[in-house]
Image: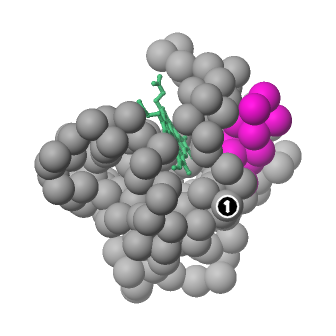
């Protein structure tokens, strides 16, 4: 198994703590990505074409939530089947193609991971530990590796 039962439990229990405010947390880690790499925002068609402030853009919030939820779900899938399964509404090749066409690069995935972990640390400081960080990292790394392998 690529993820242990304890790691899955850590991801799921911390997600349960954060889920009521998950859209706000998800938006926060995307805004952090844009602070570190401002040009990353230009990858999104709906940000290029919009006059709304970033934090008010519903499509950005939706994308941020996808990343958060899919990373969490990846922990359970990895535990159950040893691989990432994106469910009925999308697929790894589709996501790989969308990200490839949009010019998303390794550095974007790397910085997003850093921002995700930083946000989780701030969201659940009382649960934060090296193990919790590792558990979310493993889950994110496998999800991204699956997408990148098809890009
Ligand atoms: C689109 C998930 C990371 C940029 C999407 C979509 C999903 C998704 C579900 C919608 C696909 C569709 O249109 O059917 C994820 C996941 C990620 C991730 C799970 C990491 C685990 C990133 C990163 C960037 C990024 C790091 C960097 C900037 C984009 C862009 C689009 C997109 C530009 C197309 C949006 C548009 O213009 O319509 N992503 N994403 N994604 N993602 Fe990501």
In terms of image quadrants, where is residue 34? bottom left
Depicted 131 relative to depicted 20: above or below: below
Task: Say what secondary structure mark 1 lies in.
Answer: helix
Q: Can residue 10 be spotted in the picture?
A: no
Name above or below for residue 47 compared with residue 38.
above
Nearest the eye: 35 or 8? 35
Image position of 117 (left or right of 3): left
Q: What residue appears at the point 56 percent right and 35 percent down from the top-left corner? A: 102
Q: Nearer the viewer, residue 146 or 135?
A: 146
- The image shows residue 125 at horizontal and vertical percentages of 40, 84
Magenta part of the chain: 141-151
x and y percentages locating residue 39 in the rendered image = 48, 59
Q: Is residue 75 above or below residue 122?
A: above
Main SS of residues in magenta: helix
Magenta segment: does it hold 149? yes
Image x and y of residue 5, in percent: 70, 54
Residue drawn where x is 67% and y is 61% of the image:
107
Task: Check if residue 77 falls in the magenta segment.
Answer: no
Residue underneath mark 1: 107
The picture quadrant where one finds residue 44 is top left
Tell me what residue is drawn at x 75 percent, y 32 percent: 151
| Residue pictured at 65% horizontal, 82% vertical | 130
Q: Return the residue nearer the eye: 129 or 68.
A: 68
Where 15 falls versus 51 (above or below)? Answer: below
Percent coordinates x, y for residue 117 in the rendering: 53, 71
């Amino acid at each position: 198994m690529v993820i242990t039962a304890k790691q899955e439990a850590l991801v799921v229990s911390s997600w349960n703590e954060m889920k009521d405010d998950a859209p706000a947390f998800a938006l926060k880690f995307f805004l952090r990505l844009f602070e570190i790499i401002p040009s990353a925002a230009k990858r999104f068609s709906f940000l290029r074409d919009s006059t709304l402030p970033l934090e008010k853009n519903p499509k950005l919030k939706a994308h941020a939530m996808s990343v958060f939820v899919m990373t969490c779900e990846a922990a359970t899938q990895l535990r159950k089947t040893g691989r990432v399964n994106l469910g009925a509404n999308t697929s790894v090749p589709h996501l790989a193609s969308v990200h490839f066409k949009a010019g998303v690069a390794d550095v974007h995935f790397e910085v997003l991971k850093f921002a995700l972990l930083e946000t989780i640390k701030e969201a659940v400081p009382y649960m934060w530990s090296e193990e919790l960080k590792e558990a979310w990292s493993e889950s994110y790394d496998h999800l991204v590796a699956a997408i990148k392998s098809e890009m």
